Image (cartoon, rainbow, N blue to C red):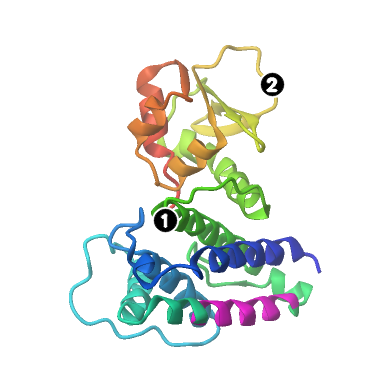
């Protein structure tokens, strides 16, 4: 199967969530996460809801005004599923999540190459199905970390999910530096990531567009060195721009105003 690595990453991530949460006492599901307004139960309800929706279930009716953190149609879908499960015992939500993900994995493992390449709806717009499912890995893996943090059980996670997350955030850097930051032509940004998935990313701006460079004879306008974990946490919006820049493990050299702009615009997930 051409995209078996995506299915394996989903399986690995969803299984990790189940193993982490299943031993919890009932009150553990109420622990608040970094997601505004969401507890551990709510995060699982969100992941559950998206999977059952893809399996054909309708979006639940939502009564009352949307919370202020709901800002788009995808957010409304997410909140409707979260609200629908909020009164259920956490273990029941977790069991439903496990059942739904087992069905999803079976469907994905049976999908042919044409099905993986088919273009259709996704939260990012019309995309090939493999891109959509890769985004499911991104969302699920970040939420695994949200749950770990909420339970004060952070852990190193060096599986396929982390690789997909870091690669996806790296791929968005030209958009950050060029489109979001409106960097001037000739700007050179170098990002040094430290850790198992560490790498050096160099971006040059020409004609208003940023592109990845393999080498450059010029000194960077901005050079930031930071751990991989701080990079993805900022890109996912889990830490503030100032926390990213002021962390003891982050080193900034060059234009400080540009560094602030980079950190502020680095948030990629909505």
| In the displayed structure image, the side of residue 146 where residue 205 appears, left or right | right
Magenta span contains residue 100: yes
Q: Tags 1 and 2 in contact by the CB under 8 Å rule?
A: no
Estimate the x, y position of residue 43 in percent, counting from the top left.
Answer: 41, 66
* Residue bearing mark 2: 215
* Residue bearing mark 1: 151
Residue placed farthest to the right in the image? 1
- Looking at the image, which is closer to me, 1 or 160? 160
Q: Quadrant of the N terminus?
A: bottom right
Estimate the x, y position of residue 30 in percent, counting from the top left.
Answer: 33, 66
Can I make out residue 15 in this image? yes
Crowd around label 1: few <14 · some 14–19 · many ≥20 (10 Å): some
Q: Quadrant of the C terminus?
A: bottom left
Q: Which residues are magenta?
A: 96-109
- Looking at the image, which is closer to me, 216 or 84? 84
- Looking at the image, which is closer to me, 101 or 203? 101
Q: CA distance from mark 1 to mark 2?
A: 43 Å
Q: Mark 1 or 2, which is nearer the eye?
A: 1
Image quadrant assignment for residue 171: top right
Crowd around label 2: few <14 · some 14–19 · many ≥20 (10 Å): few
Count of labels in the image: 2
The first of marks 1 and 2 along the sequence is 1
């Amino acid at each position: 199967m051409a995209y078996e690595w995506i299915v394996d990453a989903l399986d690995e991530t969803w299984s990790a969530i189940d193993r982490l949460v299943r031993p919890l006492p009932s009150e553990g599901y109420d622990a608040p996460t970094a997601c505004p307004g969401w507890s551990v139960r709510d995060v699982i309800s969100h992941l559950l809801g998206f999977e059952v929706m893809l399996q054909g279930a309708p979006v639940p009716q939502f009564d009352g005004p949307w919370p202020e953190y709901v800002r788009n149609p995808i957010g409304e879908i997410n909140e409707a599923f979260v609200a629908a499960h909020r009164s259920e015992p956490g273990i029941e939500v977790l069991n439903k999540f496990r059942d739904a993900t087992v069905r999803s994995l079976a469907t994905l493992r049976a999908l042919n190459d044409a099905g993986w390449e088919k273009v259709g709806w996704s939260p990012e717009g019309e995309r090939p199905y493999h891109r959509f499912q890769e985004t499911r890995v991104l969302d699920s893996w970040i939420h695994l970390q949200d749950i770990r943090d909420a339970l004060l059980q952070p852990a190193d996670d060096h599986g396929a999910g982390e690789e997909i997350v870091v690669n996806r955030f790296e791929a968005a850097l030209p958009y950050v530096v060029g489109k979001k930051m409106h960097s001037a032509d000739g700007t050179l940004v170098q990002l040094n990531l430290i850790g198992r998935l560490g790498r050096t990313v160099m971006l040059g701006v020409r004609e208003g567009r940023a592109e990845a460079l393999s080498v450059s004879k010029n000194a960077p306008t901005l050079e930031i060195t930071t751990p991989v974990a701080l990079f993805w946490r900022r890109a996912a919006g889990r830490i503030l721009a100032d926390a990213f820049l002021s962390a003891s493990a982050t080193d900034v050299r060059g234009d400080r105003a540009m560094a602030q702009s980079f950190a502020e615009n680095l948030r990629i997930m909505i």
